[in-house]
Each structure stands twice: as structure tokens, then as C-alpha cells.
């Protein structure tokens, strides 16, 4: 029993090579599958992501069912991922290659049909994203973009943005000034 827990069954060098190769393959697949999978994970996308992890599992671990082999594979995966993230941060060119660039989905209050269709997004889902970020409708936006990580970035027109603490402080100052002026006018 103990032998099965610790015997990897394949050389650790092969296990490391398998892990790195599968990591790079999945990275490329996700990069070309598009940002949509990250932006709006629906039921279909969730099923694909879950099955994807199961499909590549045997390619990573091979005939190994040992705990030490799994720990080694997980450690290699974490190290490779950390190295890729740092490399993408250090090089703008590599970052753009691996992560992509922002894509404008709406401009001046209107959805851009081409990019929305190209990324397989539904305007109903995008409308929800606009509402989550403080807008009532796409008509209140100047731009909506799909960022490299899959985040939807909504920029509302000035008049449609929510008030912040500075806006409230400015209103209070103006009210105080009006009260002062009214008080002086009544005192005459």
C-alpha cells in the first residue's frame, strides 16, 4: 500500500516535461478560445472548463496515481505558472501575446456588433455588466471594453456616473453658501 502512495511510476523529469507541455497547450487553447470564456462563464463554458481539466489530467500525470507524483506535478505547475506570469509582466510584447489586448465592445452608447459577435457575447449579458457597474443602459456609456483578463470595463458618461464623496462634499459646500446668502438676504 505505501509503495503505491509514493512510487510515481514514471521518472520525475518526464512528469515535469509532461506538466510544462500540457500547461503550454492549455494556455494556447484558452488564449485562442477567446476572452469570452473568462468574461462571461455560462453553464456551457463551465462544463468545458471542468472537462478540460479532466481530459488533460492523464497527459500530466501519465500512469501515476501516487501522492508524491501528484504533489510534484502540482509544484511544477505552480512554478511554471509563476514564471509565465512574471515573464508576461516583464515584457509588454510577451504580455500582449499571451493575454491579448483590450477589445472595444461599445462606443458612444451603442454596442459594436462586430466585436460582440466575434467574441460570442450576448448583449443581454453585457447589459447586466453595465448595470453592475452603475449604468442603467449601454446608452449611458462612452465605452465598454473586454480587457485581456476577461473583465468588462464600463466607462459611463460624466452625467451618468454615480456620485462620489467629492461630489457630495461639493454639494454640501454649495448648500452652505446658499444658506449663508439666504440668511443675509433675510436679515436686510
Image: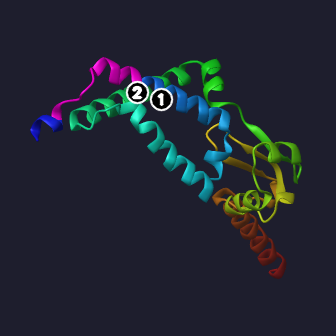
Q: Is residue 26 above or below residue 48?
A: above
Q: Quadrant of the N terminus?
A: top left
Residue furthest to the bottom in view is 186
Label 2 crowd bin: few (<14), some (14–19), many (20+), radius 10 Å? many
Element type at marker 2? helix
Residue 61 forms part of the magenta stretch? no
x then y, percent, for residue 125: 72, 59
Task: State the CA–CA distance, disc 1 to disc 2.
Answer: 6 Å
Residue at label 2?
A: 19
Residue in the picture at 67% in, 33% down: 32
Q: Nearer the viewer, residue 86 or 5?
A: 5
x then y, percent, for residue 83: 44, 23
Q: How many marks?
A: 2
- Circle number at residue 23: 1
x then y, percent, for residue 184: 80, 75
Q: Are marks 1 and 2 in contact (CB under 8 Å)?
A: yes
Residue furthest to the front in view is 63
Label 1 crowd bin: few (<14), some (14–19), many (20+), radius 10 Å? some
Q: Is residue 154 above or below residue 3?
A: below
x then y, percent, for residue 144: 77, 48
From the viewer's perspective, is 154 left or right of 99?
right
Magenta span:
6-18
Name the chief secondary structure element in magenta: helix
From the viewer's perspective, is 180 left or right of 15?
right
Residue in the picture at 12% in, 34% down: 3
Q: Nearer the viewer, residue 148 or 76?
A: 76
Question: Can residue 174 be seen?
Answer: yes
Q: Is residue 80 above or below residue 74?
A: above
Q: Quadrant of residue 124?
A: bottom right
Element type at marker 1? helix
From the viewer's perspective, is 75 left or right of 121?
left
Amino acid at each position: 500500500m505505501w509503495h503505491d502512495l509514493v512510487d510515481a511510476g514514471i521518472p520525475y523529469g518526464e512528469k515535469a516535461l509532461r506538466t510544462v507541455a500540457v500547461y503550454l497547450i492549455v494556455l494556447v487553447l484558452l488564449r485562442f478560445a477567446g476572452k469570452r470564456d473568462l468574461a462571461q462563464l455560462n453553464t456551457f463554458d463551465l462544463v468545458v472548463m471542468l472537462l478540460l481539466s479532466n481530459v488533460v489530467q492523464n497527459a500530466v500525470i501519465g500512469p501515476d496515481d501516487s501522492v508524491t507524483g501528484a504533489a510534484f506535478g502540482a509544484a511544477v505547475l505552480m512554478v511554471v505558472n509563476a514564471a509565465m506570469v512574471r515573464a508576461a509582466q516583464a515584457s509588454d510584447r510577451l504580455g500582449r501575446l499571451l493575454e491579448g489586448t483590450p477589445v472595444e465592445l461599445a462606443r458612444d452608447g451603442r454596442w459594436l456588433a462586430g466585436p460582440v459577435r466575434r467574441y460570442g457575447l450576448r448583449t443581454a449579458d453585457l447589459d447586466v455588466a453595465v448595470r453592475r457597474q452603475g449604468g442603467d443602459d449601454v446608452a449611458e456609456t462612452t465605452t465598454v471594453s473586454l480587457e485581456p483578463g476577461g473583465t468588462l470595463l464600463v466607462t459611463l458618461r460624466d452625467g451618468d456616473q454615480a456620485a462620489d464623496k467629492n461630489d457630495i462634499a461639493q454639494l454640501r459646500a454649495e448648500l452652505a453658501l446658499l444658506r449663508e446668502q439666504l440668511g443675509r438676504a433675510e436679515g436686510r
